[in-house]
Image: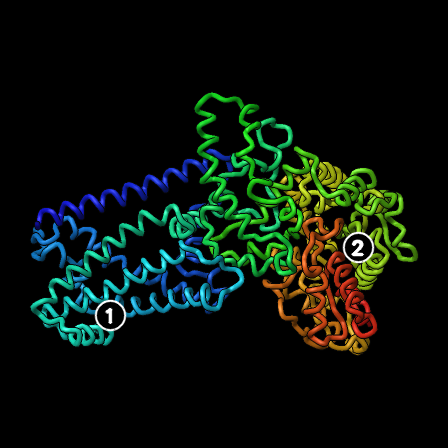
């Protein structure tokens, strides 16, 4: 009987470890059948990433209550490490006495060995083990209540996997509490924690004494270790594999700027033009999918989902995960069978678009980055979405008709409105503004290039903002120039719509023009232009110092280059500020716009419900500005405007031409034109100039 115990344990241990390792290795190999993705971060950057986001749980704590419940479980697993490791080692000896240690395998304890070096360590560890057993159970209860009682919107139900895992972890905790309390009864040990003493009292009242406590201890021991082995076998194939993949995901997190999409070499003849099939994605995309815990934090932050659209960022990740698990082995088999790329391309089951992710979902995305910001395991849903859009546009020519019109306008007239490029300078009428060509003709170089952007040059409302920016620059005696008719669209919308070819064409022309003039510093009032010029043009050799007008104006004020009289802006009343996604989440600029408003008006900004990192998108990003929204129960800009109007501020400020347009439309939709003004921070600053 004793040797049978050791044999049963040994077989279960070897099988569970072997199966877990095999499964993890299988998915790692399958993910690497996809496209290559270079990770250039340093070793210390990787270590820092894991420490901050895995060990310190930084991203999880963005939702403090939920985060704390997860912290209980996470650190509970860490504390249990010594306890479970003791069982794994001791199990190979079972009822037999271990050499050198002097205890049976069942009673082997790593903390007891450490106590020989560190006094009282075993008691301290036992105390911690008991505390975290209760904390883990509390965390599990919290998550069970959220899913099945309070029925949180973002969580799936009934979710058998969640039931199994919560049941397993609960059993791990309860079996340990019972086993350790039984062990205390067996050895008449009263030097234990209050929690363990309470369990001892319960067990004693139930009739457990020194005579039978040994059986309860052994029973608890076996229950715990067999649950561990079952857990090891179950987890790699479940959503709870994030225990394995999330640390790897953070280790391999891309080090490029948040606002930089991946670059496609359109001429190498090897790189797929987008991601339509399971093998077209990068291995990092698939690692994202494997890491997804399906917590839905991305779902509740997504502006499209919040307004009833079909898009669910969580589904983008789970679709990738299921496609990898279900289809990549078929691709692998086809390659091993010697099928050509053309033959594999004819395998419809490998397609992710339509088979797993709908086109309607892909086109509903505003690329606002809220999902990425919220994700606790470091996933990037935006990269996957844009990759699929690229496949639709570049390889299939499949995109919304009105968006095609905007892209054609960019191609023919260098702006999405389709206005003649020769009219780019008309907004400057009556202002003392030189073009870069004029500066060069005079043999001089300006301090900065003012990048006007398409909105500032062609949209009537945003022309006023361009004039306000120019007025402030003139007042500060900044030596600046504009490209005028030589300026093209930066290509932001084209790239995010999936037309990488058009983006690279426009960017290439702009870079050549700026390099010809020796441009070093650029200031722009458009966050989309700002992000593209700063973070994406370097991919094509365009290396410039780029500033958004909010940070540039803040410096002008701080350096006393301009003098302000806040009394002149008093008529604006209380002011709320809408965070632009491409200025805020993508480029972490939150304080500068607020500082400009405060200094110009002498008042603090009234914050809307969702602001800064959790600011709600206006609905125009990701090329949504140029197409109709997908069907939903509300327009994104209206939902956001309701939040802004709810502050009861008389003025809504923004620092983005797209945002201003969308919020202005929202104010009109709500019939609030008489009571609420919509202004750019440049217009507010201009009003307060002395």
- Residue at image mark 1: 127
Residue at 64% across / 62% down in the picture? 616
| Element at label 1 | helix
Quarter of the image for residue 591 reads bottom right
Q: CA distance from mark 2 to mark 1?
A: 69 Å
Give the vertical position of 425 relative to 567 (above or below): above
Residue at the right extreme of this rendering: 430
Relative image position of residue 253 (x, y in whole percent): 49, 48
Image coords of residue 3 (percent x, y): 9, 47
Front-most of residues 582 and 213? 213
Q: Which residue is mark 2?
A: 479
- On the question of residue 592 being in view, the answer is yes
Give the residue at x 27% y 45%: 16
- Of residue 406 and residue 482, the one placed in the foreground of this image is 406
Residue 39 in view: no
Q: Residue at image x 81%, y 46%?
A: 483
Query: In this image, 215 relative to 472: left or right?
Result: left
First in sequence: mark 2 or mark 1?
A: 1
Q: Is residue 267 left or right of residue 19?
A: right
Task: Please identify the residue farthest to the front as the structure is shown.
Answer: 158
Identify the residue at image location x=63%, y=37%: 391
What is the quadrant of residue 672 in the picture? bottom right
Mark 2 vs mark 1, foreground winner is: 1
Q: Residue 344: x, y in percent?
A: 53, 27
Quick check: 497 above or below 664? above
Q: Residues within 10 Å of mark 1 (few under 14, many from 20)?
A: some
| Mark 2 secondary-structure assignment | loop
Of residue 634 and residue 446, the one placed in the foreground of this image is: 634
Quadrant of the rendering where the C terminus is positioned: bottom right
Dividing the picture into quadrants, the one containing residue 464 is bottom right
Out of 628 and 114, give the one closest to the viewer: 628
């Amino acid at each position: 009987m004793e040797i049978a115990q050791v044999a049963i344990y040994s077989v279960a241990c070897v099988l569970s470890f072997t199966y877990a390792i095999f499964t993890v290795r299988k998915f790692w190999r399958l993910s690497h059948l996809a496209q290559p993705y270079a990770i250039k971060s340093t070793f210390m950057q990787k270590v820092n990433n894991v420490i901050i986001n895995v060990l310190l749980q930084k991203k999880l704590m963005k939702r403090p209550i939920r985060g704390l419940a997860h912290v209980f479980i996470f650190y509970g697993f860490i504390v249990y490490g010594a306890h479970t490791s003791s069982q794994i080692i001791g199990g190979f000896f079972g009822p037999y006495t271990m050499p050198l240690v002097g205890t049976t395998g069942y009673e082997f304890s790593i903390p007891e060995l450490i106590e020989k070096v560190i006094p009282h360590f075993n008691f301290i560890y036992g105390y911690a083990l008991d505390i975290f057993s209760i904390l883990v159970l509390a965390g599990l209860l919290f998550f069970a209540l959220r899913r099945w009682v309070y029925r949180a919107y973002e969580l799936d139900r009934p979710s058998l996997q969640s039931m199994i895992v919560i049941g397993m972890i609960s059993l791990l905790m309860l079996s340990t509490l019972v086993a350790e309390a039984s062990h205390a009864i067996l050895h008449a040990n009263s030097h234990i924690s209050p929690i363990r003493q309470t369990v001892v009292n319960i067990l004693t009242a139930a009739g457990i004494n020194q005579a039978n406590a040994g059986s309860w201890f052994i029973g608890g021991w076996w229950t715990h270790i067999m649950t561990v082995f079952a857990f090891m076998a179950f987890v790699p194939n479940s959503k709870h594999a994030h225990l394995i993949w999330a640390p790897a995901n953070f280790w391999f997190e891309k080090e490029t700027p948040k606002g930089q999409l991946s670059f496609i070499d359109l001429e190498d003849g090897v790189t797929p033009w987008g991601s339509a099939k399971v093998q077209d994605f990068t291995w990092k995309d698939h690692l994202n999918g494997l890491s997804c815990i399906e917590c839905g934090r991305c779902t509740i932050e997504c502006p499209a989902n919040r307004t009833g659209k079909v898009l669910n960022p969580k589904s983008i990740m789970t679709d990738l995960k299921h496609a990898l698990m279900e289809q990549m082995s078929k691709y692998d088999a086809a390659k091993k069978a010697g099928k050509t790329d053309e033959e594999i391309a004819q395998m419809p089951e490998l397609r992710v678009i339509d088979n797993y992710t709908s086109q309607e979902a892909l086109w509903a995305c505003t690329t606002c980055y809220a999902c990425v910001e919220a994700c606790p395991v470091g996933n990037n849903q935006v990269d996957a979405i844009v990759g699929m859009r690229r496949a639709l546009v570049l390889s299939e020519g499949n995109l919304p008709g009105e968006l095609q019109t905007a892209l054609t306008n960019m191609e023919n007239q260098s702006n999405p409105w389709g206005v003649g490029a020769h009219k780019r300078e008309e907004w400057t009428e009556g202002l003392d503004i030189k073009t870069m060509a004029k500066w060069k003709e005079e043999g001089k170089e300006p301090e900065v290039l003012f990048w006007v952007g398409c909105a500032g040059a062609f949209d009537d409302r945003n022309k006023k903002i361009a004039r306000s920016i120019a007025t402030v620059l003139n007042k500060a005696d900044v030596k600046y120039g504009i490209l005028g008719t030589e300026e093209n669209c930066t290509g932001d919308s084209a790239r995010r719509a999936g037309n990488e070819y058009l983006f690279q064409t426009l960017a290439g022309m702009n870079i050549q023009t700026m390099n010809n003039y020796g441009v070093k510093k650029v200031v722009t009032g458009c966050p989309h232009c700002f992000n593209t010029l700063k973070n994406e043009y370097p991919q094509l050799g365009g290396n410039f110092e780029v500033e958004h007008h909010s940070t540039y104006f803040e410096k002008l004020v701080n350096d006393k280059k301009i003098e302000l009289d806040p009394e002149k802006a008093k008529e604006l009343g209380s002011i709320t500020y809408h965070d632009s996604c491409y200025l805020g989440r993508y480029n972490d600029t939150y304080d500068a716009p607020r500082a400009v408003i405060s200094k110009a008006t002498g008042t603090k900004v009234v914050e809307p419900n969702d602001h800064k990192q959790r600011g709600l998108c206006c609905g125009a990003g990701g090329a949504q500005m140029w197409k109709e929204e997908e069907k939903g129960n509300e327009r994104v800009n209206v939902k956001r405007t309701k939040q802004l109007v709810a502050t009861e501020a008389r003025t809504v400020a923004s620092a983005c031409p797209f945002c201003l347009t969308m919020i202005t439309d929202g104010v009109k939709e709500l019939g609030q034109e008489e009571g609420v003004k919509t202004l750019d921070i440049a217009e507010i600053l201009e009003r307060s100039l002395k």
